[in-house]
Image (cartoon, rainbow, N blue to C red):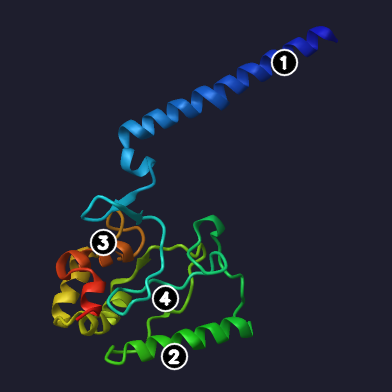
């Protein structure tokens, strides 16, 4: 009995050291040396070197001079990375319908010069609630509002959408997309921060 207990304790210690200490340290070291940016959260800095977010996690923008992301059901106010998840509301949910109807009215009012109907992704949350991307079409739909708020030509804002658009991964996986945070940072680099335009 004692011999079996000693063997079990030894196996537990060896397993703990290998899988709980050595393996995580080795993987962390490899990640930090081969992919330091990704290993540290794919953080994005502004022109002053201040961290403004991650390229992997969506955040809310609601000023007219910025591109707006998809809605979020993550947390009470949305965009909460500690509460990632969808709303779990089904197609027959009145609460979901009311929320979408309200978003449609808000988007239509804020984008009176936009061409075509409101893109579906601007009124539907992603499964995680933290999707940082939009399709180039959903970004382009917002161009006229941003151009008006910043006092620039729509073509100049559209050029930023095209410059920041990403293709399919390896040419075949996923869809074309644009990162909303990177897009908004590109707007600030080109035209200045939104507060400067609001003060005019």
Tell whether 54 sits left or right of 199. right
Label 4 sits on residue: 121
Tell whether 147 sits left or right of 179. left
Ranked by sequence position, the earlier of labels 4 and 3 is 4
Crowding at mark 2 (Cα within 10 Å: few <14, some 14-19, many 20+): few
Marks 4 and 3: CB-CB under 8 Å?
Answer: no
Q: CA distance from mark 1 to mark 4?
A: 54 Å
Crowding at mark 4 (Cα within 10 Å: few <14, some 14-19, many 20+): some
Marks 2 and 4: CB-CB under 8 Å?
Answer: no
Ranked by sequence position, the earlier of labels 1 and 4 is 1
Q: Position of residue 105 (x, y in %)?
A: 44, 90
Tell whether 162 sits left or right of 181. left
> Which is more foreground, mark 3 or mark 1?
1
| Secondary structure type for disc 2 | helix
Q: CA distance from mark 4 to mark 3?
A: 17 Å
Q: Which residue shows up at 79% across the image and 11% down it?
A: 4
Q: Is residue 165 above or below residue 65?
A: above
Label 3 sits on residue: 166
Label 1 sits on residue: 9
| Secondary structure type for disc 3 | loop
Q: Quadrant of the C terminus?
A: bottom left
Task: Place residue 89 in its image quadrant.
Answer: bottom right
Q: Which residue shows up at 27% across the image and 67% down it?
A: 184
Task: Place residue 156 in its image quadrant.
Answer: bottom left
> Which is more foreground, mark 2 or mark 1?
2
Q: Position of residue 51 (x, y in %)?
A: 32, 52
Q: CA distance from mark 3 to mark 1?
A: 52 Å
User: Camera-side residue: 178 or 44?
Assistant: 44
Label 2 sits on residue: 105
Q: CA distance from mark 2 to mark 4?
A: 15 Å
């Amino acid at each position: 009995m004692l011999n079996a207990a000693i063997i079990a304790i030894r196996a537990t210690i060896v397993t703990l050291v290998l899988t709980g200490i050595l393996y995580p340290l080795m993987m962390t070291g490899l990640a930090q040396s081969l992919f330091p940016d990704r290993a540290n959260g794919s953080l994005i800095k502004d022109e002053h070197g201040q961290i403004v977010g991650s390229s992997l996690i969506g955040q809310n923008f609601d000023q007219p001079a910025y591109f707006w992301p998809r809605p979020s059901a993550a947390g009470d106010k949305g965009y909460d990375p500690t509460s990632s998840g969808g709303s779990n509301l089904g197609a027959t949910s009145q609460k979901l319908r009311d929320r979408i109807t309200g978003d449609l009215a808000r988007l239509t009012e804020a984008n009176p010069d936009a061409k075509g109907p409101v893109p579906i992704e601007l009124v539907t949350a992603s499964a995680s609630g933290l999707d940082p991307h939009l399709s180039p079409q959903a970004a382009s739909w917002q161009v006229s509002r941003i151009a008006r708020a910043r006092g620039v030509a729509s073509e100049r804002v559209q050029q930023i959408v095209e410059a920041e658009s990403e293709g399919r991964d390896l040419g075949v996986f996923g869809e074309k997309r644009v990162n909303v945070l990177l897009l908004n940072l590109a707007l600030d680099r080109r035209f200045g921060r939104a507060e400067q335009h609001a003060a005019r």
